[in-house]
Amino acid sequence: QVQLVESGGGSVQPGGSLRLSCVASGNIFSIVAMAWYRQAPGKERELVASINSGHAITYADSVKGRFDISRVNAANTVYLQMNSLKQEDTAVYYCTIRAYEAPLQWGDFWGQGTQVTVSS
């Protein structure tokens, strides 16, 4: 069993910053990739940023230059630094990982989500 615990969400004014954290624990053999998704009310869940085991990074066009994803492999932790936040960044943010629980057993695991609200 793999668990993900997110933290760092909250309310902030436009232009502000927040840092999300996600710690993975449980039966983890290795983590292939870590990512953040978000889902705004009435919209589909979308990829915000991802980082793989080689630290190759992908960002959604809407957050490029404002968000920064990073990971600490030894701590099974991924961060999302969000700067210059806009109202359209308001959403529930989800952490997800693709991990092996054993050499030939992998799966995708999701956190419970953390609310980010950007409002004046």
Image (cartoon, grey):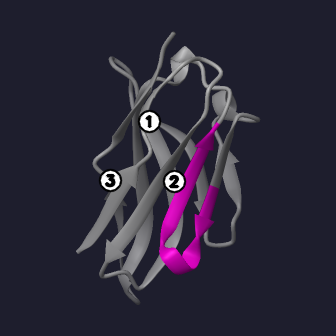
Residue 57 spot, x, y in % from top left: 69, 55
Of the image marks 1 and 3, the number of the one nearer the N terminus: 1
Q: Position of residue 60 (x, y in %)?
A: 63, 36
Question: Disc 1 designates what residue?
Answer: 38
Res 9 quadrant in image = top left
User: What span is in magenta?
Assistant: 70-82
Count every numbered label the image shows and give the total: 3
Residue with the most extreme top position: 120
Measure the C-alpha gap from mark 2 to mark 1: 10 Å
Q: What residue sits 46% from the left and 42% below the top?
A: 37
Q: CA distance from mark 1 to mark 3?
A: 11 Å
- Please, which residue is most extreme toward the left here? 1
Does 38 appear above or below 85? below
Residue at 72% in and 35% down: 64
Q: Residues within 10 Å of mark 3 (few under 14, many from 20)?
A: some
Mark 2 secondary-structure assignment: strand
User: What residue is disc 3 on?
Assistant: 111
**Which residue is situated farthest in the bottom direction here?**
103
Provide residue 105's location: percent of width, then percent of height.
34, 81
Circle 3: element type: loop
* Residue at image coords 33%, 55%: 110
Q: Amino acid at mark 1?
A: Arg
- Please state which amino acid type lies under the numbered disc 2: Ala
Amino acid bearing label 3:
Gly
